[in-house]
DNA sequence: ATATAAATGCGAATGATTTGCATTTGCGAA
DNA sequence: TTCGCAAATGCAAATCATTCGCATTTATAT
């Protein structure tokens, strides 16, 4: 699975890349470089933040990963497969929940017609008020 | 117009805020803090980057502005009015063009039903291949 | 088995954004 | 109108995520 992904992208199969992809794959939410770093270290593997950043960048370029930006400009990463997800975050309590549908799918065709661009990636950040906070 | 916006937000009317809002208003695209800074300086007004950042942050909090994130994590700002826009950027040549429709409008109701969250803001970054680059 | 390009680790650099603090300014109350 | 005080500003220094340079190691095609 992961081997194929790397092979298709023309990338060497290395220990670091396996670790990184495994962690992202098993994470239920988009995950930051820093968190990946901590997890790998806690499993007492040697590693390095720049390697992680480099790997994440390459995997994004190759469209294996999606980069998700929080409103503070920091990035998280998730697999770019059919199961990729979007969240909405409450600007009062910071809780975030999953959104069922990816709005870009429907939009993609529209954009091709409008602009001629073929959509290869997207990042969406939604903020709102959650029901709890809204009551207050 | 700008006076009302500030008053409604409970903010003092200052020279800096007027300048910043005027510049954002008259910009055809989302604009960075740095560019705002350069424009104000080039009009030979004294100013300071931290003031600009502080102002932009407050205006975002008050929902007068939308913060737009590029995939490198840097921010641009535009008015949060009905005319706000989204763009798609070619990952090969970096050209970006306007997208006619804001996909969030249609999505907003859906999200309320799914999650109970009321959508107050959003940031979308789309990447793709432009027709020119696609030919190559 | 070996050559070569790619990947890694480490430390230092970068660059956008934030913060602390002293000074100035806007504005409501007297 | 003047006064007082909180809010806003300017400046310099700090922060923090991310990137870069370079020496060393590793994967893979031949």
Image (tube, coloured by chain):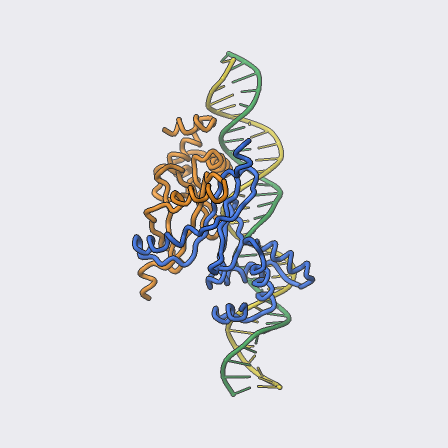
Chain colours: A orange, B blue, C green, D yellow
Disc tally is 0
Q: Position of residue A36 (x, y in %)?
A: 42, 40
A7 over B107 or under it: above or below: above
> Residue B72, percent across and down?
52, 45
Q: Residue at x 38, y 57 (%)?
A: B119
A47 vs A61, nearest the viewer? A61
Q: Is residue A21 left or right of residue B7?
A: left
- Is the N terminus of chain A in the top left, top right, bottom left or bottom right quadrant? top left
Q: Residue furthest front?
A: A113
Is B8 in front, or is A72?
B8
* Residue A34 visible within the image: no
Q: Is A1 on the left-hand or right-hand side of D29?
A: left
**Picture layout, residue B36 above or below residue B135:** below
| Residue A81 at least partly seen | yes
Give the x, y percent position of residue A20.
42, 35
Q: Residue at x 47, y 33 (%)?
A: A62
Q: Is residue A112 above or below residue B102?
A: above
Which residue shows up at 39% across the image and 26% down it? Answer: A4
* Among the 4 quarters of the image, the one containing residue C3: top right
Q: Residue A116, relative to residue D27: is it above or below?
A: below
Quarter of the rendering occupied by the C terminus of chain A: bottom left
Point 46% across, 62% down: residue? B63
* Picture coordinates of residue A46, whole percent (x, y): 45, 34
Task: Give whichever of B105, B71 is nearer the camera.
Answer: B105
Question: Horizontally, is A119 left or right of B111 in the view?
Answer: right
């Amino acid at each position: 699975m992961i081997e194929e992904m790397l092979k298709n992208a023309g990338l060497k199969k290395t220990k670091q890349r396996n670790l990184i992809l495994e962690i992202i794959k098993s994470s239920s939410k988009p995950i930051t470089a820093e968190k990946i770093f901590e997890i790998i270290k806690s499993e007492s593997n040697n590693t390095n933040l720049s390697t992680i950043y480099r790997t994440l960048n390459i995997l994004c370029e190759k469209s294996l990963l999606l980069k998700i930006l929080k409103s503070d400009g920091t990035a998280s990463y998730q697999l770019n497969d059919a199961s990729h997800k979007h969240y909405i975050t409450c600007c009062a309590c910071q809780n975030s929940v999953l959104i069922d549908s990816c709005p870009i799918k429907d939009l993609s065709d529209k954009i091709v017609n409008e602009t001629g661009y073929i959509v290869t990636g997207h990042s969406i950040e939604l903020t709102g008020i959650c029901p709890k906070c809204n009551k207050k």
